[in-house]
Each structure stands twice: as structure tokens, then as C-alpha cells.
Amino acid sequence: MPSGRRGAVEEGLTVLEAARQLGVELESICGGRQTCGKCLVAPEFGTFAKHGITSSNDHLSPPNQDEQAYTRKHGIDLNERRLGCAACITGDLLLHIPEGSLARKQVVRKTAGQLTIELKPAVQMVYVEVPAATLGGRGDWPRLKATLEAEWHLSNLEIDPALLPALQATLRAENGAVTATIWQQRTVIRLEAGYVESLYGLAIDIGSTTLAAHLCDLQTGAVLATETMMNPQVRYGEDLISRISYATDPAGMSRLHHAIIKALNDLSTLAASAAGIDPEAVTDMVLVGNTVMHHLLLGINPVEIGHLPFALATDEALDLYARDIGLKAVNAGARVHILPCVAGYVGADNVAVLLAEYPYLKDGVTLIVDVGTNAEILLCTSDRILSASSPTGPAFEGAQISHGQRAAAGAIERVRITSQGLRYKVIGDDRWSDELAEDESLRPTGICGSGIIEVVAELFSAGLINRDGKFVPDAVELHPMARYNGRLGELVLATAEESATGQEILITQKDIRAIQLAKAALYSGVRLLMDRLNIQHVDYIRLAGAFGSYIDPAYAMQIGLIPDCELAHVTAVGNAAGDGARIALLNSDQRHYIQQLVRKLEYVETAAEPQFQDYFVDALTLPHAVDPFPHLEKIWSAK
Amino acid sequence: MPSGRRGAVEEGLTVLEAARQLGVELESICGGRQTCGKCLVAPEFGTFAKHGITSSNDHLSPPNQDEQAYTRKHGIDLNERRLGCAACITGDLLLHIPEGSLARKQVVRKTAGQLTIELKPAVQMVYVEVPAATLGGRGDWPRLKATLEAEWHLSNLEIDPALLPALQATLRAENGAVTATIWQQRTVIRLEAGYVESLYGLAIDIGSTTLAAHLCDLQTGAVLATETMMNPQVRYGEDLISRISYATDPAGMSRLHHAIIKALNDLSTLAASAAGIDPEAVTDMVLVGNTVMHHLLLGINPVEIGHLPFALATDEALDLYARDIGLKAVNAGARVHILPCVAGYVGADNVAVLLAEYPYLKDGVTLIVDVGTNAEILLCTSDRILSASSPTGPAFEGAQISHGQRAAAGAIERVRITSQGLRYKVIGDDRWSDELAEDESLRPTGICGSGIIEVVAELFSAGLINRDGKFVPDAVELHPMARYNGRLGELVLATAEESATGQEILITQKDIRAIQLAKAALYSGVRLLMDRLNIQHVDYIRLAGAFGSYIDPAYAMQIGLIPDCELAHVTAVGNAAGDGARIALLNSDQRHYIQQLVRKLEYVETAAEPQFQDYFVDALTLPHAVDPFPHLEKIWSAK
């Protein structure tokens, strides 16, 4: 974890060696000499029914002298972390690889989209010179308040009581000259001596899998840094249902809550560091996430979202002090705004997508799809907005796929089947695999979501699989890389010699099935919404999120992931949820606007619609009216 | 400490023996056998300039085997606590006696005064039945909110976000039936399943020396328990100036803050236990205290109150969550209201006195005096209210007096000089010392404030001291208990045989001087306010606080502690500050009322008035036009 890679290795291998065999490259500077400490791993013990294993402390060799010396010196608890180059595998294990131990950091293409937002942040800074205290006169805060009212017309101001202890020293440091940061023209949340200009905010999209933060200068609107991080909750469950299930145990709930809070603190520190500012300079935050992330963030057990009628504790927008939910890597008085949710699985992230995309809708019907571990769907006309959520599961993110991995360096992201074999591209290299010199290789480590979709589409278009997704009986004769493993077909994407892992990279019959299930879930949700509008066709499709940025719309349509639509009208809109969070960060009027808009949404609960199951079963097959890809036709007709 | 008793003892005595010699009775069940642990004491190390000593760890014998065994078994840190029966004194020491180690608990006569207050607390409980969640419907909080609005006309309600984690389980426990506690018709601060009646509040007067809490049933207004406790900050300084000085060091500030917070938690627990309720049932609190206590409570360093212009960080009323200042022995959502302050040393306690007494003012001029470590003075007419604070110091509370002690069991509280000698009463016994059988004794342990005032008045009335407070040259001839110690006179109140300490109880020339300084400070403050009103005479005097309850007004007037006034118009009003806090607790309209009233106060800063010094010097002498007490005249004329 968190890549989800699993496999059998020889007993006695070190964790470092085993990880390499499985295509997980651990950082190592000392080359396994137990001195650099870069390959630290975090074993997770317990019975993991989902994985069918019991991970135990006994399944790792006891620490040797070098490991004991290293961990003692660096204050590392051997119950929590082991040196990958020292600990040997002697049985079933679940290992979490901390981000810092990974040799290849995650690549994320999305950056904060270019948007024009009127700058009107929820926090403002005002400079005043407060008259000195007088004998028998009013206290320091009442004098500051009176000055703010007289000079800035800010009436009925309150002060964050946490500012009172330092108030007098701050006022006296520069003879009453202070800069106050004021939230919503209502509350003084920060006070600094003298004239200061420093107003920063964080917009964070809390995805089930990825956390993405934009650090913005609230005086210019500029995005100073965009940082992403794996959601550390992944180790407790890949999809929403498994996290809800993990939260059933109070200890599990506590772990999920604290993991996300710690990650947000880390992310804030990272973003501030990237922007070259002190995290203390951040005074406002906007957070969005799906309903389960939303609840876990607030310490609310999401158990009620796990069963009918999928009730949320609250769907209202929330205004809090960051410190109240444990967010410490920001100013002590920093505020947090959390966008409202809709219902069920349609959360604040979907609301953020709406905030980002709604103003730019064209005439006609627009479908907005945000594919994550759940797919969130918005179907908009000029006067109606329908929303739904579909449980696609993490297959599109490369999880639950034999050699799947997230969209990171080394992942196969493009695949073309040729008569001679196939060609592919990996993330981090612009060349196709057949454009290399003879002794070169792209050294793929696995395949990511967009790659998987292309494989399935190419296999179908080439006639190697049928509408049911099954390898055709003569697939092996038709194509050199196709083969049968027992009764099930599979396609070899990369040989053991080519791959970085020393193992073949395959697409199996089971992988194709996983993609069929995921795309059927998404398509059925879309169909339900289309039924509500009584339409057969959408005019525009916007694909949001990282997946939407990597995916080739032609392939997505080819496998029936999205409904038919003129290809030129299908656009990727990047991290729209993050953009929406950023809009709410930069303009507090938009927070009010979206609170009104969200109550007009028509929510459709897919799980409760009898029609959903029918659509789902229908959508499992690959589309009937598919035109083979032209390049494939050429290949096969050439044969 | 905290009694302030000091003296020289023979080297090598145990702390338990030494304490007894000084009249401090430590609890002991085992009789000094180092097994019961009742006599634990807390040594304070460091140089205490005020006391002129350096208290050092070396000045106590090292722990013997029994003490080591006892402390190890009970997890006691020998650096913080020692067994009084084991540790022997080998040099100068400052020792704090924890309340639990004192054999005689403090006696406080004041109970919550009988007042008629319209019941309108800031918190209310409402019962509702919230409809069940529906598919795609609103979340639980919005549904609860809508129900509260529909059934109770409570609009725009907010919820304490800390309630969200438990909200869904509470709602489902009894099928949507819940009782919500709502603060100021604005915020839901507690939510309980089903129908519940349980609404309690605490009104606490935070005195420099004594903390007094009234636990009230907010549904009936009844006072269920009144508990008092020593302010644990006393160990860090007896008066306000020494506490401000102690707070100069950040570590000292932190100790003062945490000491008061811990004490309030202990007091809440005690009061709840006395009332037979769970501390969790307390949902509202009103706190009052002088400005230094107010700042220390809020974690604000009172340093600015320690010098001109005595600026307060804030003088506004404050509304907080109890948890925000660390008050935990109440409901997690409990609110705290802190009454406003005036300026300088005139704090929320004085405002509370005003709240309690102002509505009952008669025509004419009323002087309200609250004597604590500082004297707070209010001079009221039908259209003006003047306020001031005078630094009387702790002499009236028995501190800085040779054999002074607080008003506790064993303290001499009444004194009459007779031609044969004198007679006295001690707290806890209704008899005079000359009404006992021959082998009996009242076993006094010291003298408290009211006793000291009576001694001074009697000495003056009897002609044993002159207007300057000096023993007259022939005092020894005039009275058998008067004597000269070198050049200075003194009066023996109790012989070593009579006293509980085995030592004489004396009033020295220095003690008389201390009383003169204290009464001059108080009188000068009153005079300044009278000047402002251009009056020579007050119509009514109300003496607030514990001191005001013990003191005999005739004696107070005799020594010039208070201005002349018809004796029948001088009344003790008990703990008026506590009563004011209770009024604000029971009726939230009164909180708004006093916030308006307090801004009409005319604050007079005694320290800044040049006239103050003149008045002070004049007031040092005993009043010119004093009539000898009739009983004394009889005695002396009989001679």
C-alpha cells in the first residue's frame, strides 16, 4: 500500500528486494546497507479479509543489530517502522510505503486551471493606528474596535478570544500601529504589529485517493503553489464503502479522522514551503470532498452514509476555526469554510465542480462527470440541474487491476494494438515503445486507468474480445500477445524483459470485467439522469478530475463510459472540484451563491432507482454500434 | 502558605511539628508514623524577596526509607510533595499546605443571598420529534433545525460543530425524539435522546483569596449548592501586585493561569457532587472577578494592569465556550459568560456587586464597599455611579499581621478590653473567653480581620494607643496585657497556655500600623469619590464580601474605616459579587442591562489623583472626634 500492488515473493527476501520484484521502487541511497534509512516501511498488522491475508509481526524477521542501531539513533519505533533493506519477509504481510520512501514521486498533470474570478476573499487586512491607553479609559480591544469602526466602517466587530492574550503586547510593539485580519467583516482573527501585507489561503480538494491543494495569494488571486498528496486513508480502504466499513470500529474511525487531519497539515506545510511562505500566513481555507471524506474530516462517523437512506449528519456549508478540527499548519486564527453537500454520495466536491463549471454552461444539455473512486454526475440545462453519484469503484484509478497502478511515472497510459504486437507509452516519456533503440525499454511498472480503457477499447475494436468483454476463442491465433491462461484469455502488454519489475505486465479477463463493471455503473447513473430530463442525447460533456485529464474521450466513448456526443464537444476540465474550492476561497460571495444554487439541485439516488439495475446490466456489454478504430482496420485488412 | 503564617522553629523539627507550633494544624490519622499520608506538604523553592528568604531543597532532610516507600507506593513525586511527619526542617523554607492536608477546613458564613430574580436563563431546553431521514432528503442537522423552527419558532439556529459527530446516533436512539439545549435562542449546544429535564448553571466569584460557586437549577432558580475554595494562586502571591509581578515570567503566568482553571474545574466537581448532579449537566456559567483574576483566567498577562495607565486587554463582556478556556468539569458544550470590567482594578466582581445592589438603592447617597485584597468602592446616587479601587492589601484578611489568619475556625473575631484584661470570641464557638470553666480555653490559633479591627478600636477607645496608633508611654501601667517589647508596645491577646499553638497571640505596633495603612487606603478612595459628588456625608453604607459580613460596623466607623453614617444604615450584604453573578446566570436580560449600565459608570483612578496622597496621610491617624465605647468608659472611670 498505497499502490495496492500485491504478489508472492520468495521467503527470506528483504522488503526492499520484494518491493522491487513487485514494481514498487523504494528509495535507497546506501544501496541496502542499513545506513541511509530511505527505505523505511510501515507494516500493518491484522487480518485483512478483503486481501485474504493475516499480516503479522511474526512474518518479518526480528530487527538485526544494524537496524536496531539505526532506529535507536533516529528515534524510530520498531513497532511502527522497519528498514526495508533489513527486514526479511517470512510470511503474509501488508506493508504501507510512506510517500517519502517511494523512489518515484507521483506525477500530477493538473495545475490550478486558468479562471477569471473576481477577487473578494472572506478575509481582509486593515491597518490602523490605535490611540494609546488612558487612565480610566477603555480597554485595548474596545479602543481597537472603535478605531476599526471609525476608519474602516467595520461595525459590531468581534475578536477571536484566542487573540486576547497577545493583544496588548502587539498593540504596544509599534505604538498602536497594527494590521488586523478580519473575517467576513465580522471577526478579527489575526493581529500583527505595524503595517503588514500577508494574506494567503488554501483551497483543498479532499479526494478519496488524492488530496490536492492550491495555495493562493488572496491579495492578487495568484496560485503560488499546487501540491498533491496521496490520501493516507487509502491504507484503510480503497473505496468509500470499505472506509465506511473500517469506521464502524471506533478505533478505525479515529484512525481515519486523524490520518486526514495529519495529511492536511502536511499538505499545508508542503504548499507553504513550495510557495516560499510561512504556513502561519495562511488565514483562510476552503475544503471540499465527497460526503464520506467530509464526514471523516469533521470526525463524524460515516456509518449512516453506508446504508439506506444514506443520511448525512449535515449537508449545510460550515464555517469553523481551522484549529477546531485540528488543522495546525496554518495561522492559529485561520478560518475554514466547507462547501455544502447535496445528499448521499454527492458531496461538497461535486458542489465545487458545479461552482466551477455552471457559469460556463452553453445552451443545450451538458453532462459533467467527475470520475474518482465514486463517479459524480451533474446533468445541467439552462433551468435544471440533476445530480447523482455512481459507485464505480477504484478500477479507473488502476486499483483492483492485476498490474494496475495510479497515474504515476512508469505507468502505461496509452496502448495501440498493431498486427505485429502492440505499442504503448508510459507516463514520463513522450516516445512510443516501438520508437526506441533496440537496447532501450520504457521500463513500465504497471498500467493506469487511461491505459486500461485504451486496452479494452483496442481489444474490442480489433475483435479480440466480444461485446461481453470475453476473449474470442481464436484470439491467440489473431494476435501474438494474446494467450490463454487456463480457460481465461489475457493480453501481454510488456514482457518480463521489458518491464521495470522483471515480471510481465498483463491485462487479464478479470481486469476487463472490472472495467466493464465500473463503466456500467457510471453509464447507468448518467442514463438515469437523462431519463429524468427525458433526453437521449447530451450536447456537451465535461470530464473533471485527474482521470478526465488523462483519458482520451474517443476511447471513453468507444467502451461506453460516456454517452454518445460530438467528440469536439467533449472536454477535460481538469480538477474542477479544486477550481470550485479556489473560487470559493477567492470570492466569498460565491460561497453564498452556491449555497442557494445547491438547494435547487435535483438529487437522484441511483441505488434507489429500480431502473438502475436494468441499465447497469445492459451497460456491462460493450457498445453495439462501435466503429473499429481506423488504424486497426488498416492492420487487420492488411493481414 | 496559603495561611501566610510564618515563624522561626527549632532546627530538626518535622514539618508537622513545626506547623503545629505555628498554629497550622495538619491532618494526621497515623499520628506521624509515615503511613496515612494525610500531612503531605508542597515545598516551594526559590528566593522570595517579599518574605526575605531563600527556600531550598537542601533545607529539608532527605527522604527516609519510610517516606520513600510511601511515596513510591502512591506515585507521589518527592520533588513536589513531602510527608510532613517525615521531612525535617534544616533551613529557611516556604511550604504550601494543600487544602486536603489542613485539619480545619475553612468556614465561610455566606450562602447565596435570598434574592428575587425573574428566571430567564441564557440556555433553554426544547423537546422535538424530528422526522426520519429520507432518500435524497436533507441531512440530520437541517431536519432538526427545521423542526426546531417549525415547533419552537427558533429561526436561524446554529449548531455547535462539536455536536456533529454524535448527532446522528442521538437522533436515532429514540426515533428522532431529542431534547436540545439552546443558548440565547441562537446555538444548539447540547443534544440528548428522548425527553430530558436537566438544566444547571454555575455562578462563580473568583476572588483573589477565595473562590465561591453557586450551583443553580436553571429551571427553578434554586441554589442547589454553594461551595468555596481557596484561590490556589495565593501561593504565588497574596495580593494583586505580587501576582502581577509573578506573571512577569512566562512560566509564572502559565502557573497562575492553570492554577485557576484547575481550581474552577475542582470547584465545579465539588459543587455538582454537593448538589447530587453530574458536572456534565452544567450548561451555563457566569464568572466574575477583579481585573487581574479576569485576565489570568483568560490567559492574558496582567502586566499592563501593573503600571500606569493600568490598561485592560478588554473590558467588554465575553461569551465563550467553557472548553475554550479549559473548563472541563461541565458539559462539553457549556457556555461561559464573563461580566464586563470597568477599568484599572475595578473589575467584573464590582460590576456584579452593582448588578446585585443597584436595583435596591434608596434615595440619597449609598456607599458600597467590597473589601478584599483590594477594596472596591461604588458611590451611587439616583443618577450617578462612581467607582474606584483602593489597594488596601491583605491586612484586613489577616495577612501581614503577626498572628493574623483568615476568618477560619480558631480565629479571634471579637475582642473587648476590660479593666482586668480582655475577653474574646473565636470563630466556631459562641462563648466569650471569660465565660468558660477554669480548665477550659477557646484555644485560639490567631486573629482574623474583624478581630484586628476591634482590637485597634478598643485600644484607641481605652486610651492605650494615641491618634497616631502608637502605644501611649504609660500603656503598661494602664493595662495588664499591654507591654513594651524594646521600644515598641504590644498587647497580649492570649497567653501561650491559652492558645492552640503554645505561643502567645499578640497585636504588635507593626500590626496596628498595617491596619492604619489599609484603612487609610480605603477611606481615601471613598473620600475621593465623595469629593466628586461634592458631599461630606453618605446616607447608606453596604459592606459586601466575607469581611463585610464579619465586621462590626460600629468598630469599622470607630477606626475610620468607613465614613460617618447612621449606624442603622450600615448593612452587610454578603457576597454581593456572587449574588450579581447568580443574577446574570438566572436572567440573561440582566447581562445586557449591566453592559449598558457599566458604561455609565464614572471611574476614578485613585492612583492618579494628587489628592489621594493627602487624604491617605490624613487618614492614617485614628479619627479625632471619637467617642469612647461606653463599656470602656465604665471600666476606666471605675478604676
Image (tube, coloured by chain):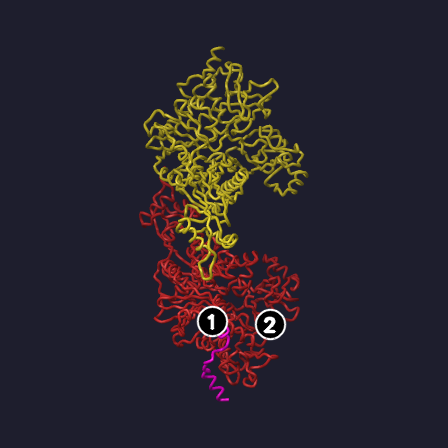
Chain colours: A red, B yellow
Dot 2 falls on a residue whose secondary structure is: helix
Residue identifier under label 1: A524
Is A84 situated above or below A413?
above
Q: Is residue B308 left or right of residue B41?
A: left
Instruction: Evaluate if marks 2 and 1 touch, with contact meaning CB atoms under 8 Å apart.
Output: no
Q: Chain of mark 2?
A: A
Is A422 situated above or below B313?
below
Q: Are marks 2 and 1 on the same chain?
A: yes
Q: Earlier in the sequence, mark 2 or mark 1?
A: 2
Using a 10 Å C-alpha cutoff, classify the residue at mark 2 as few (fewer than 14 neighbours), some (14 to 19) or many (20 or more). some
Q: Residue furthest bottom?
A: A638
Residue identifier under label 2: A21
Q: Is residue B295 magenta?
A: no
Q: Position of residue B433 (x, y in %)?
A: 55, 20
Q: Is residue A626 magenta?
A: yes
Dot 1 falls on a residue whose secondary structure is: helix
Residue B482 vs residue A201, the one in the foreground:
A201
Q: Position of residue B493 (x, y in %)?
A: 54, 21
Residue type highlighted by circle 1: Ser
Is B76 situated above or below A557?
above
User: In this rendering, does residue B362 appear at all?
Assistant: yes
User: In this rendering, does residue B510 appear at all?
Assistant: no
Residue type highlighted by circle 2: Gln
- Mark-to-mark CA distance, 2 and 1: 39 Å
Residue A521 vs residue B245, the one in the foreground:
A521
Numbered circle sitting on residue A617: none
Numbered disc total: 2
Q: Position of residue A541 (x, y in %)?
A: 40, 72
Q: Position of residue A341 (x, y in %)?
A: 44, 60
Range of residues picked out in magenta:
A616-639
